[in-house]
Image (cartoon, rainbow, N blue to C red):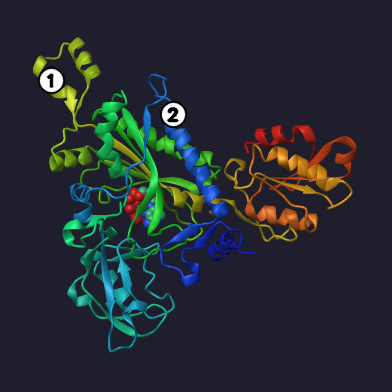
Amino acid sequence: AARSMEALVSLCKRRGFVFPASEIYGGINGFWDYGPLGTALKNHVRDHWWHQTVECPPLDPDSGEPLSVLGLDSAIIQNPKVWEASGHVGGFSDPMVDCRETNGRYRQDQVEVLFVEGRGAWAFPENKPDAIAKKLRKAGVTIDDGEVKNLSQVDESLYGTIVAPDTDKAGTLTPPREFNLMLDTYPGVIRNEENKAYLRPETAQGIFLNYLNVLNTMRVKVPFGIAQIGKSFRNEVTPRNFIFRSREFEQMEMEWFCSEEEAPKWYDFWKHERMRWWESLGIDQANLRFRDHGSDELAHYSSACVDVEYRYPFTAPGFGELEGVAHRGNFDLTAHTRASNAKLDYFDQELQLRLKAEGVGKDEIKERSRYTPHVIEPASGLTRAVLVLLCEAFTPSPERSGSDYVMKFKPKFAPVKAGVFPLVNKDGMPEVAHKLYMELRQRFACEYDAKQTIGKRYARMDEIGTPFCIAVDGDTLENNVVTIRDRDTTQQERVGIDRVAAFLAEKGC
Ligand code: ATP
């Protein structure tokens, strides 16, 4: 059994984690449905993030008090002016070069797009002549780690003959053009440009739109955060790598509003908090790393940005993005102030008092204590986190009979916490096992299974990542003890039947 993406995608489908969307109609590129187990996994990650961010947030490193982070659930569709102000209408695009049909030799829809900035040179068939690739490299376009860079430098001399993927037929390149990644829609009855709105490409703007509402209603003071989890949509040119890059996905984002002076401190704080959080999912530290953005990668308003990266099977031995933590300055609130005329600045009374005590002059106090807060933004993908947990858990198990793979989820995130089995489906064992199942079921997602050999039942639980299997056997009938099998070690231990619920709770189920 291989640890390939194909094998993982196949397991996910076979065991009810993730299905291709609209599968009976041939699917739809870039969209996925989460099955019963995938939904459970996703909800567990979502709840863990919410719990650790909003309900029981980290403590303030100075005061030791819990930080203020408030929850939000804003609309997916907002006034289109939002996306003009935020820069998404003008700038949220990928430079793209597409392939034109030549001489009717292949259809354009078979080779829709060839080169997309930052998105991989999958169009270069590795085993085929790549004359254009050479030319592109000469012009300064680089293809590192499967990513195309500096595509905007492509000039006309390069619109030559290329070799199409998976065929050896030739075509031509169009000049580079900007392709906006927002999906649009038309709320209301009139379908024209004026009524065009967008599905949000990030949850973050909904937070900026509600900054003032939260400030006015929730008795909070800067610094504080607003957090949101929800769907986002991007018309990705090349959705790929299973659920890594899809056109509909979920994000977990927080905007942390603070003063300009404190922003570097909070940037550092959140960077390390976020890494700690990823480790709390049970991800091996060796598969996680930080990657600081170079000054050439930063948005013009941003003074620092770091990605938390994971070693995905399709990037290994390299890493790919999982989360970005950005110091966004006060770009967004300033942009919305300008575009909407709303007053989004903040009067910092504590700063005013402190400056007064320090003997600072009146005019300076006035100027410094009213400001537009700066923002630190940890932005991650929930669906991408699900992919990371799936990749991390996915373990070939050639030594076991019946299952090729074990999914080693941390018990807290496992979709099913325990399987309850009578060793054989007779001799009074099913009745005892079913009674235990009924008790456990009040607290834990668990399954009762009496069919097939016990080996087959274990194998199925291994493949869906159930951390514990509880067998009722002859000893249970005589001495009230069950056998609990550990998914990862296959070791069995004897536990009193009245201690099983406590056992599962202690193990973090
Ligand atoms: P990329 O450069 O990979 O397109 P990005 O830097 O544009 O990503 P952000 O806008 O910072 O991504 O979004 C924050 C997070 O949202 C990403 O780190 C990722 O986890 C997730 N994300 C972004 N786009 C997608 C997508 N198309 N599918 C799944 N998750 C996504």
**Residue lying furthest left in this view?**
363
Side (left or right) of 125 relative to 412: left
- Expressed as whole percent of the image width and height from the top left, the position of residue 424 reads 84, 52
Q: Label 2 is placed on what type of residue? A: Pro
Side (left or right) of 1 relative to 373: right
Q: Secondary structure at mark 1?
A: helix
Q: Which residue lies at the image location 26% right of the left edge and 39% below the top edge?
A: 208
- Expressed as whole percent of the image width and height from the top left, the position of residue 41 reads 54, 48
- Expressed as whole percent of the image width and height from the top left, the position of residue 102 reads 27, 85
- Expressed as whole percent of the image width and height from the top left, the position of residue 446 reads 67, 45
Q: Which residue lies at the image location 33% right of the left edge and 42% below the top edge?
A: 74
Answer above or below: position of 443 versus 169. above
Q: Quickly name the residue at label 2.
A: 58
Residue 204, picture quadrant: top left
Mark 1, other Cα within 10 Å: few <14 / some 14–19 / many ≥20: some
Q: CA distance from mark 2 to mark 1?
A: 32 Å
Answer above or below: position of 183 versus 346. below
Residue 11 visible, this angle: yes
State the residue in front, 138 or 370: 370
Disc sitting over residue 366 in the figure: 1
Instruction: Kindly indicate whether the residue at mark 1 contacts the one at mark 2 (C-beta within 8 angstroms).
Output: no
Q: Secondary structure at mark 2?
A: loop
